[in-house]
Image (cartoon, rainbow, N blue to C red):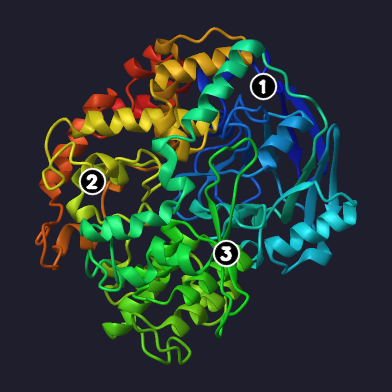
């Protein structure tokens, strides 16, 4: 079995003991790697109802079968999987860069962290050597500062580091884990879980070669996909980057603005991808093995935020800009830099600030509540001040650091109607009131509000369906997209490269076989994709989530879009959502309550988990 390192590393932080186990070939083939393998390992090593911030909650770091290879975008990614402190559901996030490739070269397919260290430590993996080293000197440092300090201590600039900032140390439920200083496994509060274990960072150096089973076939695919990634399907990422979506979504009236008050931002031109690239982008960086180069580094060269620098993507630009009503790019770049400094998920942070501004303008939160911060929409100073408060858990920031769901529960006064989240995870940059397929995909997403579990918004935006209509058939569309995306995140191939897989399953099956030497048919790969989404649903079912959790934010279902334009008056009714949920569950072969059936588990070779669903079927 090539491609895979063949080993899973177990680290008990409470005792300091480590051990390795062989990765079973059947498990590898059934769950591929990345998020699929990670969820399988988490479920096998956890107990029902585990507190996400307790020592008993495992944190899994998993790689894909092509990690460490030359395959374009597939050689560099890694995934963290756990139970989310924000949602109580699957906590999962993928990041790219160089960290994943280094870990594969060290000889591991996955790491499972359990227990809790008595003191702040960092995990140092140097091939077969695994040590828990004192990190007291790193307390309070940013991920960037932490990375530099660890490299200096070890004496090797090429050591790769993933770490948390102060937000993770203070158990903020919107904290992320950052590698390469700006690349984040950002969503679902993973930084808080690492912080709860008293782990500041994971540092790795690997020296092993990665070999593939069929080198000639594999290299043919590498050359082919290099050319594909220089073509039209990736042009956006190679030029303006994902920030191109600002003007696209604004023109389509589907960009949530001012905490879902409107779906269109009148100052979009001022914060557009075009403006960002013309005035602020200083360089564009590629991850290991990637021919596209999509990481746009923006620098503020003058003014009050001179020197601020951050990687800017659509979601961070949208959340810290239009969603808060802020129209100053220099302030948005500074805000993104602060999120990196404290180790905060920029999307959740921006949505949380937008929530606060909405509460303030409606009189739910006073100036005194906010410590004197004038938190009105469009106030860039308030945006930055609130991020500082959240990162430090100071004043109002202590309430906001756990995201909008937890904040609304503490604030009360009907503020939950202004808290835009699904399952406890803050929304992302697509207005679900006028994107009905996307609305369904967000509702059923196993990690909460999320465009990256299926990219179903593209079906709506490209006119493949009537985006204002809820109808049967949308469930199958979402299911098929979810299955493709589950494979991308299990191979850990960058989603920006998804358009280069012209024959989704055929291309991926060929890639899998050429790397691992394990025969993989299209039908077997399709079953693996379905299996990965099913195990996610099993986890959420075991942890107590039900159909009622597959819902949408209050504003999406109760406040029609007010903007004059093509989607005026659009929103999602409960009847529409129920129709689409029924359709989706049927397409998955689940019960009307959204529970995988024993019949479906048998079909997918997952009978070992029938105890989770049998009580729900009665």
Q: Residue 4 bears which disc, if any? A: 1
Q: Quarter holding the C terminus?
A: top left
What residue did someone put label 2 on? Answer: 461
| Residue at figure coordinates x 46%, y 38% from the top left | 495
Figure check: 68 above or below 328: above
Give the percent coordinates (x, y) of residue 28. 59, 19
The answer to whether one can see residue 36 in this image is no
What residue did someone put label 3 on? Answer: 310
| Residue at figure coordinates x 64%, y 30% from the top left | 67
Q: Earlier in the sequence, mark 2 or mark 1?
A: 1
Give the percent coordinates (x, y) of residue 159. 80, 46
Q: Earlier in the sequence, mark 3 or mark 1?
A: 1
Figure check: 52 above or below 328: above
Dividing the picture into quadrants, the one containing residue 9 is: top right
The answer to whether one can see residue 456 in this image is yes
Give the percent coordinates (x, y) of residue 140. 72, 69
Determine the CA span between mark 2 and mark 3: 29 Å
Nearest the camera: 248 or 353? 248
């Amino acid at each position: 079995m090539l491609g895979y390192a063949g080993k899973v590393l177990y680290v008990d932080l409470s005792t300091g003991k480590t051990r390795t186990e062989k990765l079973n070939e059947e498990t590898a083939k059934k769950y591929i790697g990345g998020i699929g393998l990670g969820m399988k390992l988490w479920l096998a090593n956890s107990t029902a109802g585990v507190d996400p911030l307790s020592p008993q909650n495992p944190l899994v770091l998993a790689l894909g079968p092509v990690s460490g290879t030359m395959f374009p975008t597939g050689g560099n990614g890694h995934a963290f999987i756990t139970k989310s402190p924000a949602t109580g559901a699957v906590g999962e996030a993928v990041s790219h860069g160089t960290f994943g490739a280094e870990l594969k070269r060290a000889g591991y397919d996955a790491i499972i962290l359990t227990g809790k260290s008595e003191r702040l430590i960092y995990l140092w993996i140097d091939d077969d050597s695994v040590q828990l080293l004192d990190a007291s000197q790193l307390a309070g440092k940013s991920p960037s500062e932490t990375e530099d300090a660890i490299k200096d201590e070890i004496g090797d600039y090429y050591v790769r580091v993933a770490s948390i900032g102060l937000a993770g140390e203070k158990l903020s439920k919107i904290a992320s884990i950052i590698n390469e200083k700006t690349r984040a496994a950002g969503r679902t509060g993973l930084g808080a879980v690492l912080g709860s274990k008293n782990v500041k960072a994971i540092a790795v150096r690997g020296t092993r070669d990665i070999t593939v089973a069929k080198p000639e076939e594999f290299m043919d695919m590498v050359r082919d996909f290099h050319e594909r990634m220089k073509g039209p399907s990736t042009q956006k990422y190679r030029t303006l980057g994902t920030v191109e979506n600002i003007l696209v979504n604004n023109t389509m009236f589907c960009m949530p603005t001012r905490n879902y008050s409107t779906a269109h931002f009148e100052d979009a031109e001022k914060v557009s991808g075009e403006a960002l690239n013309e005035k602020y982008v200083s360089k564009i960086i590629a991850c290991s093995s990637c021919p596209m180069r999509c990481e746009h580094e923006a620098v503020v060269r003058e003014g009050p935020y001179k020197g601020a620098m951050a990687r800017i993507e659509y979601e961070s630009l949208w959340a810290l800009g239009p969603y808060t009503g802020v129209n100053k790019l220099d302030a948005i770049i500074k805000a993104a830099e602060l999120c990196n400094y404290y180790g905060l998920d920029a999307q959740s942070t921006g949505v949380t600030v937008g929530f606060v501004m909405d509460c303030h303008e409606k009189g739910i939160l006073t100036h005194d509540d906010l410590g004197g911060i004038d938190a009105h929409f469009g106030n860039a100073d308030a945006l930055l001040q609130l991020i500082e408060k959240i990162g430090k858990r100071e004043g109002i920031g202590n309430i906001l650091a756990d995201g909008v769901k937890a904040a609304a529960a503490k604030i009360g006064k009907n503020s939950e109607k202004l808290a835009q989240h699904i399952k406890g995870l803050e929304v992302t940059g697509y207005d679900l009131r006028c994107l009905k397929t996307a609305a369904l995909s967000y509702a059923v997403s196993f990690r909460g509000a999320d465009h990256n579990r299926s990219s179903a918004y593209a079906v709506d935006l490209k006119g493949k369906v009537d985006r204002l209509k809820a109808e049967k058939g949308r469930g199958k569309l979402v299911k098929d997209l979810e299955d493709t995306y589950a494979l991308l995140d299990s191979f850990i191939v960058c989603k920006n490269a998804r358009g280069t897989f012209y024959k989704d399953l055929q291309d991926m099956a060929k890639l899998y076989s050429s790397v691992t030497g394990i025969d993989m048919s299209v039908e077997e790969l399709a079953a693996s994709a379905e299996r990965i989404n099913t195990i996610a649903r099993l986890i959420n079912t075991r942890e107590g989530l039900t159909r009622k959790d597959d819902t949408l934010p209050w504003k999406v279902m109760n406040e029609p879009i007010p903007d004059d334009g093509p989607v005026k008056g659009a929103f999602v009714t409960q009847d529409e959502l129920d129709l689409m949920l029924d359709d989706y569950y049927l397409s998955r072969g689940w019960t009307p309550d959204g529970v995988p059936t024993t019949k479906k588990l048998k079909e997918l070779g997952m009978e070992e988990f029938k105890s989770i669903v049998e009580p729900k079927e009665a």
